[in-house]
């Protein structure tokens, strides 16, 4: 079964608004990553946060990690229509990267 | 463009048949990963090869097999195909052997089994 469950499954917002996606996982992790997938295309790595880190920023992206709650969140600030995509969290432990179910984000101009 | 190439882009075949999907990793990457993405199962890790050797196995069926060649390209063989094997198959690559490194994904092969 998949390691990560994401919430919400789908999210629709207007350009300029912030988008927040949450990921919960079940076991210990070494790191957690977020990937983006445009419709039917390959995944693109966004950001990696290690298990001993609590927050990380990259451009308009902010990721938090709470290992005590086994959860992470991805915040996209000042969203753009080009951010429309599916976003997946992926957890790494031991020898595999396991992907969550994904959040489908739609940003309307 | 991630630098990872996959062929073919689309494949349509019949149940019971066998197909081979091909992947060339980014220049310098020694690890290759195979994933299956379907609507009901999501994105599932199948198998990883590192420098020609199998490194980790996920939810790969016995009907499926893979290998990585000396030039580091990889092939995923799917046999006795069933309708449920219809999916997007992605290859990814990374520099080292740890799956927790950033992975670079190819554009995928869409397999349709009729």
Image (spheres, rainbow, N blue to C red):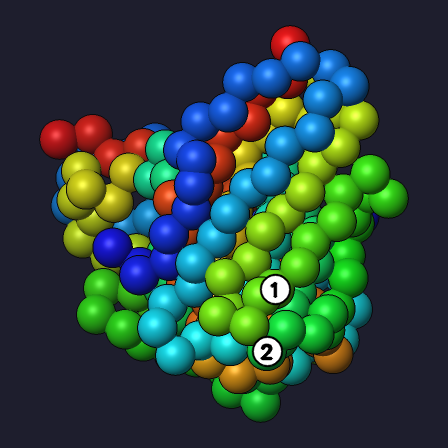
The foreground one among B32 and A84 is B32
Helix, strand or loop status at disc 1: strand
Instruction: Name the residue located 40 percent from the left edge and 33 percent from the top edge.
Output: B9
Q: Is residue B48 left or right of residue B91?
A: right
Label 2: element kind: loop
Q: Residue at x 37, y 39 (%)?
A: A41
Q: Which mark is residue B43?
A: none
Residue underneath mark 2: B51
Q: Residue furthest bottom?
A: A52
Of all residues shown, which one is farthest toward the front? B70
Packing grade of label 2 (10 A; few <14, some 14-19, many >=20) is some
Q: Position of residue B8 (x, y in %)?
A: 43, 35
* Residue wearing tag 1: B68
Residue A106, visible in the rendered structure: yes
Lower sequence index among marks 2 and 1: 2
The residue drawn where x is 34% and y is 48% is: A19
Q: Confirm whether residue A89 shows in the render.
A: no
Q: CA distance from mark 2 to mark 1?
A: 7 Å
Q: Are marks 2 and 1 in contact (CB under 8 Å)?
A: yes
In percent of width and height, residue B91 lies at 51, 53
Residue situated in front as seen by the camera: A107 or B80 = B80
Q: Position of residue A49 (x, y in %)?
A: 48, 78
Residue A61: percent from the left, percent from the top?
Answer: 30, 65
Q: Residue furthest right?
A: B62
> Which image quadrant for residue B81?
top right
Residue B85 or residue A55, whichever sits in front: B85
Q: Are marks 2 and 1 on the same chain?
A: yes
Residue at image location 37% in from the left, 58% down from the top: B4
The image shows residue A55, relative to residue B7, as above or below, that is below
In the picture, which quadrant includes the N terminus of chain B?
bottom left
Pointer 2 chain: B
């Amino acid at each position: 079964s998949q390691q990560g469950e994401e919430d919400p499954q789908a999210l629709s917002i207007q350009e300029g608004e912030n988008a927040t996606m949450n990921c919960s996982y079940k076991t210990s992790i070494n790191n957690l990553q977020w990937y983006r997938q445009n419709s039917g295309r390959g995944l693109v790595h966004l950001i990696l946060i290690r298990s001993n880190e609590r927050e990380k920023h990259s451009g308009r992206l902010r990721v938090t990690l709470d290992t005590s709650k086994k959860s992470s969140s991805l915040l996209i600030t000042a969203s753009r229509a080009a951010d429309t995509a599916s976003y997946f969290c992926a957890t790494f432990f031991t020898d595999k990267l396991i992907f969550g179910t994904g959040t489908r984000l739609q940003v309307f101009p | 463009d991630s630098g990872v190439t996959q062929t073919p882009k689309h494949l349509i075949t019949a149940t019971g048949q066998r197909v081979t999907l091909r992947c060339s990793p980014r220049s310098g990457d020694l690890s290759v990963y195979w994933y299956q993405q379907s609507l009901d199962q999501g994105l599932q890790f199948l198998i990883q090869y590192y420098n020609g050797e199998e490194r980790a196995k996920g939810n790969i069926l016995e009907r499926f097999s893979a290998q990585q060649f000396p030039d580091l390209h990889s092939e995923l063989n799917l046999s006795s195909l069933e309708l449920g094997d219809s999916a997007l198959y992605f290859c990814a690559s990374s520099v080292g052997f740890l799956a927790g490194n950033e992975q670079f994904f190819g554009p995928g092969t869409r397999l349709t089994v009729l």
